[in-house]
Image: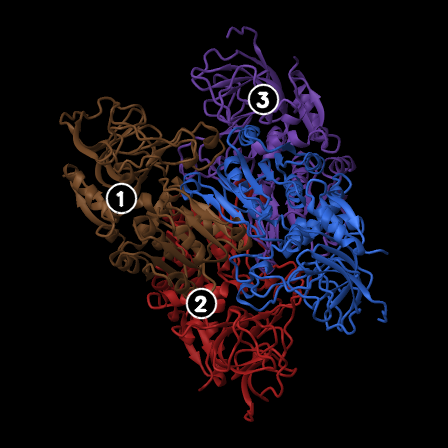
Chain colours: A red, B purple, C brown, D blue
Amino acid sequence: MTYTKPVLAATLVAPRRLEVREYPYPSALEPGAVVLKMRASGICGTDKHTFRGETEQYVGTEYERSTPFPIIQGHENVGVVAELGGGGATAFDGTPLAVGDRVVPAPNRACGRCHMCARGFPYYLCRNLENYGNSLTSAQTPHLFGGWSEYLYLKPGTAVFRVPDELSDEVAVLTEIFAVTHSLERAAALPRPAGFRPGDSVVVIGAGALGLAHAVKASLMGAGHVLVLDPSARRRELAMRVADAVTFAPGDEVAREVRACCGGEGADVVVNATGFLGAFAQSMAMVRDGGTIIEVGAFVDMGDEAFNPAVICGRNLTLMGVGGEDLRAYEGTLALLARHHRRIPVHEIVSHRFAIEDAPLAMTTALDADASAKVLIVPRP
Amino acid sequence: MTYTKPVLAATLVAPRRLEVREYPYPSALEPGAVVLKMRASGICGTDKHTFRGETEQYVGTEYERSTPFPIIQGHENVGVVAELGGGGATAFDGTPLAVGDRVVPAPNRACGRCHMCARGFPYYLCRNLENYGNSLTSAQTPHLFGGWSEYLYLKPGTAVFRVPDELSDEVAVLTEIFAVTHSLERAAALPRPAGFRPGDSVVVIGAGALGLAHAVKASLMGAGHVLVLDPSARRRELAMRVADAVTFAPGDEVAREVRACCGGEGADVVVNATGFLGAFAQSMAMVRDGGTIIEVGAFVDMGDEAFNPAVICGRNLTLMGVGGEDLRAYEGTLALLARHHRRIPVHEIVSHRFAIEDAPLAMTTALDADASAKVLIVPRP
Amino acid sequence: MTYTKPVLAATLVAPRRLEVREYPYPSALEPGAVVLKMRASGICGTDKHTFRGETEQYVGTEYERSTPFPIIQGHENVGVVAELGGGGATAFDGTPLAVGDRVVPAPNRACGRCHMCARGFPYYLCRNLENYGNSLTSAQTPHLFGGWSEYLYLKPGTAVFRVPDELSDEVAVLTEIFAVTHSLERAAALPRPAGFRPGDSVVVIGAGALGLAHAVKASLMGAGHVLVLDPSARRRELAMRVADAVTFAPGDEVAREVRACCGGEGADVVVNATGFLGAFAQSMAMVRDGGTIIEVGAFVDMGDEAFNPAVICGRNLTLMGVGGEDLRAYEGTLALLARHHRRIPVHEIVSHRFAIEDAPLAMTTALDADASAKVLIVPRP
Amino acid sequence: MTYTKPVLAATLVAPRRLEVREYPYPSALEPGAVVLKMRASGICGTDKHTFRGETEQYVGTEYERSTPFPIIQGHENVGVVAELGGGGATAFDGTPLAVGDRVVPAPNRACGRCHMCARGFPYYLCRNLENYGNSLTSAQTPHLFGGWSEYLYLKPGTAVFRVPDELSDEVAVLTEIFAVTHSLERAAALPRPAGFRPGDSVVVIGAGALGLAHAVKASLMGAGHVLVLDPSARRRELAMRVADAVTFAPGDEVAREVRACCGGEGADVVVNATGFLGAFAQSMAMVRDGGTIIEVGAFVDMGDEAFNPAVICGRNLTLMGVGGEDLRAYEGTLALLARHHRRIPVHEIVSHRFAIEDAPLAMTTALDADASAKVLIVPRP
């Protein structure tokens, strides 16, 4: 491919220093590599933390890391295949990729060889996981390892998912967030008295994009009641529209009110989709005995919460930590979004769109949680 | 039945006041009630807590309670049917009970009518659970609601399990503790990357009777490695004999050593069978990413532990609180004990036997964790 | 209660002899018994078989039976509590029932004492199961053991579920059929490669009321594609409306077409909701390797089908037989119907309503599968 | 590596024509390929079928095939790494392989790219599965694609498992058969009333090597009762020794006797480990209502059995077809064999050993099911 113009990409040079830089278009693709012409890329909570310099991620894990500045951020991506390395590449559905295919790439890439990969564990447990927009520095060729760019370089072996035609870019870019809701699919397999069953009540604490995705997914999986708790009236209103949720603002009596809405006992499942301290205690106050708490928002270390083992035991609670998306959830997510996109205004989760050149403004907007939901970086056509 | 002698029973009149009292033999049984002539009754960790006045049990649950002194303690029981109320009663296997049948009774009795019972949840979630040896005062007729007695009165609807002939009373009395290990059966149904599978490594922290029961059960369910951590050399030695366990004493390097024994990643499952603070942090240090921690020993509120939601998320851990035994685990437990009793010296978990009259000495002995394992109260023949 | 008028009830005196008879209102209720004033009762496939004299039900089971004529049919019921026996009765949600409560009763009553009940197995495995509208003869007092009657007598211990106000009688009467779809909930817990996951494709063969209930439930549980196969254009159209289904008429190429709609491999789950021979072979042709077939329509022995163990093995298929509803599915069903009843025209599954006096005509109508879906018997007010 | 001697390998030239041929040692290994110096290779039921010309395997699946004669048979293998292709190779535990490592290789190799692989399904569902000893002809270089040879060539990407030192070659060679018992692990995750739980009764029909492996595994996973049915007294005696099984010879009353041994209801799980017609009907007669039948022995099409959908429905049975081993079961299998090899004489499943040159005699011996269990081909040192 002859592509001679420089590639524009928003680059985080250091905490709070987001600059638009130019990179050369990749000169020679490895066999199996793919270059995407970007259509949209989201700003995620993790991106905000990194921007602010809260870079201790995956604390306590083997792949705890600090950010290798400079980086091109952006791991919630949708784009069109622009070029394929030698030998071509295969989509997740086993069919060959072609130039022009619109796809969502996985945000991470597993080694496939470590003990965790080898045992068949989900790729998020890989010991050598690489994260687009996060763990790969743009200081090294071919540079384009993040989505806030005109082009994104995907290393060989990166999973790539076709986007159904009926889904807009705005919806497709939400695929990665929805793929985190494999949490609820895992909960569906937990034996009673834990777990999620059709007709169950599900509480979601925090109506950011991740919380909303959980609310929508719970609704689509047959929740009998979806209850969403968030301080922002705008977000609560969005939760009502996309998940037919009953909503609550924080308050002294909210736990009691939520329990009353769940037949008095509390919710079968509580999803804690905030990274804020105190939300775990609130989850405990809202879940029924024998129920399940899904901890999903805490990607960055905000410190300890109190935790009483006697209560976990005495109440027979199950607590499930979920650190991110699962490859096996993408196809289902895309099928579900395609099936329901006319009825459910999932695209409203996207609140703003900015050009690459306006990435700093995009970030400022995203940091104002009250005014924004999902903010996108959309390259000029 | 004509039974005119008074019935001897060790009675906890107040914290630390254990007296041997006499009660009348029950004069008229309710329809469906059963009187057992006791063969043996264990001293459980809960009994020790109650004795010491640490009576805030099931904290944070709807059935949080304080002890209705005086009580006859003893809920780990084996006895022989002495008398049946009108209409008879049925064993858990659906066959009629007869005088002379040797049985293990369930330690609790569910109402069968509350929302939790009605939904088919396990009986330990019943809103009106009655606990023999704990929640029923001996001040009320027919008094004999605990096992440290010559006779035990079982209210109608109490589940009763036949004991296979080949099991001694010493082994049968351990049934209730082993029925707590439904924890591992629930873990076996958790979807990967969590859960227990044959060949997995299981760490048990704390080799009291409950910890040993978990070690034995893990071994019988096909654990590839059973690792037991306890400060007492005697208990560690017992863990080796009954569960073919590799054992560890506490120490600065123990978490690293345990991980090394589990292929470097940590154990697939860690069972925290102590009520002591700090053991949860240790569990976290020993479990592999994506693995499961079972919290099972903390029946009494010992206070909070630190807990970092970011680590639970980042490491994709599952935490399962288990507050006690499950009716559905008794038949399996008895079948397993019968199958393996010749090979596995489970009876060695019983370290001491005392007559009812010596209950205070029995309690003193049980309180010395280092010198004792399971202490029994055995009525004189 | 003083109730002196005779009670009208359609009575099946012998195969094909459906007569309207009068019975006395029950004179004295047992403690715990409930009398319902009927609002509506459905005609089920089983009822049709019994009417035709195909009375060998539950073949090969311990509770294989022939019908104890005369019987009042009707086990899909909704009614209002008219009278309570001494001591009152409790709804499934643990709250006391009161006269005037609108409820759906369970169609069966378990003994609670046999080995199957005692082990905590679902009530449909009870060894002494009694079936309203089926196994209880109206020759014995208090006679009113079926729903095609002005009043229905519920023996003590029959599970009873409150109907949310927003649900019409037409929808409430479908609760029992929807409760059979616990089949899909069980499938959701099957480990991969079997089982149902959000985004999966589900084929339903047969769009009678049971098939439609499965299609709706699959859709509500997050199916990515629902495909329904039925010869009747009217039923297919209904499947589109209630389950957003892609529909197929039988034909030589239908299996190939269905597989093509499921990404080429076949469906993740095939529900065989017909009692007709040949449908099992069709299920095999439509399911993907490693997938799941749910056999649910075959309540009456229609004879053998061919079955090749080498194909079941070689293709790693799972086959799950489901013989009826599960008590644990009622509350979830009612919650789901209440949540979605405005959007999903479930009430359209009801095609006809007849008075008790017109029960013979109702049956004739129901027997014409092409012209009818669910036919109701509705007492005159 | 300089290796100039020809490599001896038993070669099936056509049905019933087993010849010992010489092949050149592979001259240049692909990157990632591995050559094993064979220690032992088993004769499997599939091998016997192929020898007899019953070559229609995996009937009804996409990878139905006929045998590409000539082939070197042998897919149950243990050997020592003799040479590694460029870049080396990694064992399943994520550590690099070295010359001299004793390993068990997987018998199949998945493409990793088809829709089934991509969706994360077990490798046995791969659309392009290659089978050592079966689907790869020795007519093509590097020829050595089966284990009845002095050397075995493993293509890049073949899974390879380290053998613990304490396991003899005789036990290690059984790893593949034991890995088929992931069937029981899947059963352990089935929700009640189906599935396997500790204390359950498990019937195994057929005490060939596969049936014995299931009996041993059931015992190690905590079966309360293991019952084995086989016409051969020698095999029954072996089942008693390795699985502490109660055994039965076929007979008119055997189903009734088996049910009586299982508390009257029948077994919780029946494993049909024969390829013979009629065994499915027997499985139905021995399983309890709501229980599980595992179909595992039928790799070759022996024709249809009768199957009554009304019985599957009415009795709420689950039927699970299992077509072979699962990669995820190897590490657990090896850990279990290592843990229990001193106590359980698993090596007695091996009845005969023959040199490569005596492969025809080995086959004749293996075909006499009554006289043999597992027959090995063991190269001369």
Give, as a three-letter code, the residue at label 1: Val
For the residues labelled 3 and 1, the Cα–Cα distance comes to 49 Å
- Residue that badge 1 annotates: C173
Give me the disc on residue B147. Answer: 3
Identify the residue at horizontal 68%, vertical 26% (top origin).
B375
Residue closest to the eye, B341 or B46: B341
Left or right position of A114 against C54: right
Give, as a three-letter code, the residue at label 2: Leu
**Dot 1, how many residues are within 10 Å of its Cα: few (below 14), some (14-19), or many (20+)?**
many
Identify the residue at horizontal 14%, vertical 25% (top origin).
C4
Image spot of residue D65 (x, y percent): 58, 62
- Residue that badge 2 annotates: A334
Give, as a three-letter code, the residue at label 3: Gly
On screen, residue D79 above or below D221: below
For the residues labelled 3 and 2, the Cα–Cα distance comes to 59 Å
Labels 2 and 1 positioned on one and the same chain: no
